[in-house]
Amino acid sequence: MPIDEGLTAPFRCIAIVDGERVAVVAKRIINAGIERECVCAVLFRAWGISVPEPLLLRRADGTVLFASLDEGYPNLKKALAISRDLPEEKLNRLTWLASKIICSWEDAPRVLAGDEIVENGDRNLGNFLWGGGNEHMYIDHERALGGAPFDENLMVRYAVAAEQKDAMCNGATTFANMGIAANLSGLEQHAGLDFGWALAQVQTHIVGLAQRIIERFPWPDDLLSQ
């Protein structure tokens, strides 16, 4: 069943995993995209971030697909009926509400830091799944790790909009200073995929992370320095 969100035409289907039928969301993407998705999913889950369990599926023709368990949640944009066709005032109000929801999640500061590490500039409102309250998941990391330009950490934008700048910055920098490790569990070579290049980038981006996070936030001018 096609999903009408996403540039890579994800679709819902039933897959056989360890002899059991499970509901998944899958997409056909190039190997580099699969490697980015797998590395981000495994690392984020190791860091206590809510990401659906990743899967590699092999079709009858040998094609490998990236997939994840279907959590059944709508994305945040759809859940709040956010559309650019809305009047500007209502759009701004709903975007503010979405920012408040995102910043209320306990793992949001870790996502901010994680997105900085993997250079994910595609944390748009369609890439959050939300089941109401604290039920949420972060999805779609195909454009991280060099898959697209990383000009802005969108989690910072949500933090500023929700007036949670200090809490989000402090939480993210605390996480950055905890001695983050790039967990390799489950990332051995598989099905012709090579995760080494992505993990090497992650190791490099962990260096100096706390300072980069601080510099992402807008701060008042220090009058004493004028």
Image: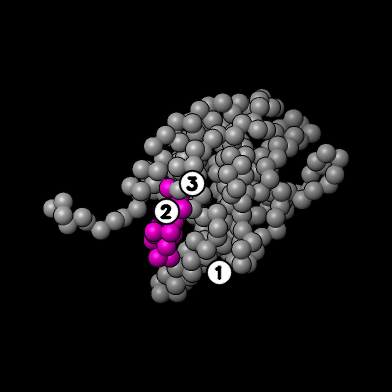
Q: Secondary structure at mark 1?
A: loop
Query: At 46% from the left edge and 53% from the top edge, which residue is drawn?
Result: 171
**Quick one: 220 or 95, which is closer to the camera?**
220
**Sequence-first disc among 1 and 2:** 1
Q: Secondary structure at mark 3?
A: helix
Can I make out residue 200 in this image? yes
**Sequence-first disc among 2 and 3:** 2
Judging by the rendered image, the residue that carries numbered circle 1 is 81
Can I make out residue 120 in this image? no
Magenta segment range?
A: 155-173
Q: Residues within 10 Å of mark 2 (few under 14, many from 20)?
A: some
**Image quadrant of residue 16?**
top right
Disc number for residue 175:
3
Query: At 45% from the left edge and 48% from the top edge, which residue is drawn?
Result: 174
**Image quadrant of residue 107?**
bottom right
The image shows a total of numbered marks equal to 3
Judging by the rendered image, the residue that carries numbered circle 2 is 170
Residue 163 position within the rendered picture, expressed as x and y whole percent measured from the top left = 40, 65
**Outermost residue to the left:** 226
**Answer yes or no: do the residues labelled 3 and 1 have beta carbons within 8 Å?**
no
Mark toward the viewer: 3 or 1? 3
